[in-house]
């Protein structure tokens, strides 16, 4: 079975609520997590919501990272989508769990692009 | 069961290969798909790969859309992540399937942010 990409969907709960509303911190952290996984950052787009919440994407040469935060719930949804074998998305996931102070989390891994090779 | 977001993961196969490598077309189409779903576009980031392939994110007030294309495989991975009840992500999905000329596809729906309310 040949898959083009690996997609990690993180559910991060009971996080540090102040951190979840700090756009500059989240922007730097997502890029740092990408680098820690061995990925190359190509572009990004972030948005601060009012009264609270941040959405942000980092495009990497090997696909993307995404975060949406709900500070009022202490919750963040994070996606880490990578392709190729040189990148280690699990390293980015562990950094994010730690930096957001998530007291509980789950990670769902989905293979993307499973193509017939006939 | 209360979920903050609905996440559609689209696997689009046997697509029009020229379209999959056309950054400007994909950028316009992803924004148009967001609008058709009733979402409000806030920002975007796209990247054209060499020799082929495009990655792009559109941040919407209700979360995000993402596309990664592999023209050489006729394949695209698309994510449509929305929150709230006013947006209809299925409409965006149908538009993308049609515009990319996908001859086969699958859609996986995942609830995000299922929180305990106690």
Image (tube, coloured by chain):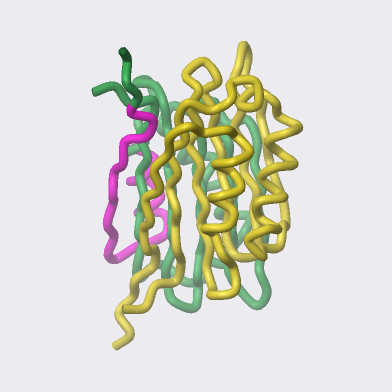
Chain colours: A yellow, B green
Q: Quadrant of residue B40?
A: top right
Q: x, y (%) of residue A68?
A: 54, 33
Horizontally, residue B8 falls left or right of residue A33, namely left
Horizontally, residue A25 falls left or right of residue B55, namely right
Q: x, y (%) of residue A82?
A: 53, 62
B19 to A76, vertically: above or below: below
Q: Nearer the viewer, residue A7 or B98?
A: A7
Q: Quadrant of residue B75?
A: bottom left
Picture quarter with the N terminus of chain A? bottom left
Horizontally, residue A47 falls left or right of residue A73, namely right
Q: Nearer the viewer, residue B17 or A82?
A: A82
B73 to B46, vertically: above or below: below
Residue furthest toward the left?
B1
Residue furthest toward the bottom?
A118
Magenta region = B91-114
| Residue at image coords 34%, 21% | B85
């Amino acid at each position: 079975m040949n898959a083009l990409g690996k997609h990690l969907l993180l559910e991060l709960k009971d996080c540090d609520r102040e951190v979840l509303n700090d756009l500059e911190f989240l922007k730097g952290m997502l890029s740092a997590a990408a680098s820690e996984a061995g990925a190359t950052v190509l572009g990004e787009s972030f948005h601060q919501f009012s009264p609270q919440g941040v959405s942000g994407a980092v495009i990497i040469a090997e696909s993307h990272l995404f975060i949406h935060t709900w500070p009022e719930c202490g919750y963040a949804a994070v996606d880490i989508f990578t392709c190729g074998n040189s990148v280690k998305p699990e390293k980015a996931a562990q950094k994010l769990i730690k930096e957001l102070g998530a007291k509980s989390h789950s990670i769902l891994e989905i293979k993307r692009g499973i193509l017939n090779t006939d």
